[in-house]
């Protein structure tokens, strides 16, 4: 049965990942895109209450897809769509394809996953999709249709959303798909804050520097992508 599909992301309306996701989604139904007008990464589940939100039609390179930029956050985009910004309430929200993994404790910062959570709040199936932030997307492009076919009608369970991560290796190095991955409780990046400038009044400006860990607990989402697998799992909403 054809779906009403909303696509959003946190990398912005013109990101490569959202275009590739829309191209894959059109075979499953009618697709609308409402996404931020610029970068909103690591905004988590922020919503906008202190100012109006502008939703503006934009040209989009996938035929048949109606697309709009939004001055708000990914969660705002989902709320707007569920409350009349598109002609029909979405049956499913696809959030992504994010540039950068959303696994382990990094999920708590993710606006990509938060958009899927907001869908669940609104009684809509939510699927978050992420990939390595490098330039190799061979695995994503090979497995995306299969993953959507598997999940678009699949109920993740009460208060849960689907979370999918594609490894950044070459397709020839991909080891397949691991399902039912649990969220690792480990940190993904070992961060440090380096002082880079002294400011007036005794202040100091810092910049963050992170190095991705190279090992993780077996059975988790993080372990899967580190070892060349597509990771599919459920994550629980906060309520």
Image (tube, grey):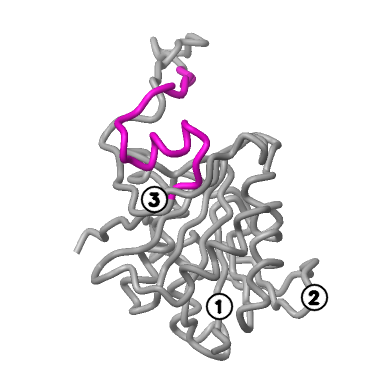
Pick the residue in front: 51 or 127. 127
In the rendering, at what x and y percent does residue 10 appear?
54, 53
Spatial separation of the CA atoms under disc 3 and disc 1: 22 Å
In the drawing, does residue 45 fall left or right of residue 212?
left
Q: Which of marks 3 and 1 is nearer the N terminus?
A: 1
Whole-angstrom CA distance, mark 3 to mark 2, is 31 Å
Q: How crowded is mark 1: few (under 14 residues within 10 Å), some or many (20 or more)?
A: many
Q: Residue at x 69, y 59 (%)?
A: 20
Query: Does the magenta segment cover residue 203?
Result: no
Percent of width and height locating residue 46:
38, 56
Work out whether 232 lies above or below 87: above
Residue 106 position within the rendered picture, expressed as x and y whole percent measured from the top left: 37, 39
Foreground of the two, 210 or 145: 145
Residue 220, magenta (yes or no)? yes
Q: Residue 33 carries which label?
A: none
Q: Name the residue under label 3.
A: 44
Q: Quadrant of residue 65?
A: bottom right
Is disc 2 surrounded by few (<14), some (14 to 19) or many (20+) residues within 10 Å? few
State the residue position of label 2.
63
């Amino acid at each position: 049965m054809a779906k009403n599909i909303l696509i959003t992301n946190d990398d912005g309306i013109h990101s490569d990942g959202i275009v590739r996701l829309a191209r894959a989604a059109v075979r499953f139904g009618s697709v609308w895109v409402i996404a931020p007008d610029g970068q909103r990464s690591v905004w988590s589940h922020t919503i906008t209450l202190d100012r109006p939100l502008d939703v503006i039609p934009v040209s989009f390179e996938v035929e048949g897809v109606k697309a709009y930029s939004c001055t708000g956050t990914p969660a705002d985009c989902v709320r707007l769509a569920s409350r009349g910004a598109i002609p029909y309430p979405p049956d499913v929200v696809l959030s992504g394809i994010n540039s950068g993994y959303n696994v382990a404790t990094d999920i708590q910062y993710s606006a990509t996953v938060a958009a899927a959570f907001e869908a669940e709040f609104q009684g809509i199936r939510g699927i978050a999709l992420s990939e390595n932030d490098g330039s190799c997307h061979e695995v994503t492009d090979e497995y995306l249709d299969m993953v959507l076919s598997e999940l678009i009608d699949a109920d993740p369970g009460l208060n849960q959303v689907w979370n999918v991560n594609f490894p950044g290796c070459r397709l020839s190095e991909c080891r397949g798909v691991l399902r039912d991955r649990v969220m690792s409780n480990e940190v993904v990046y070992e961060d440090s804050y380096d002082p880079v400038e002294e400011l007036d009044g005794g202040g100091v400006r810092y910049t963050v520097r992170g190095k991705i860990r190279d090992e993780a607990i077996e059975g988790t989402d993080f372990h899967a992508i580190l070892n060349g697998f597509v990771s599919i799992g459920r994550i629980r909403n906060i309520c």
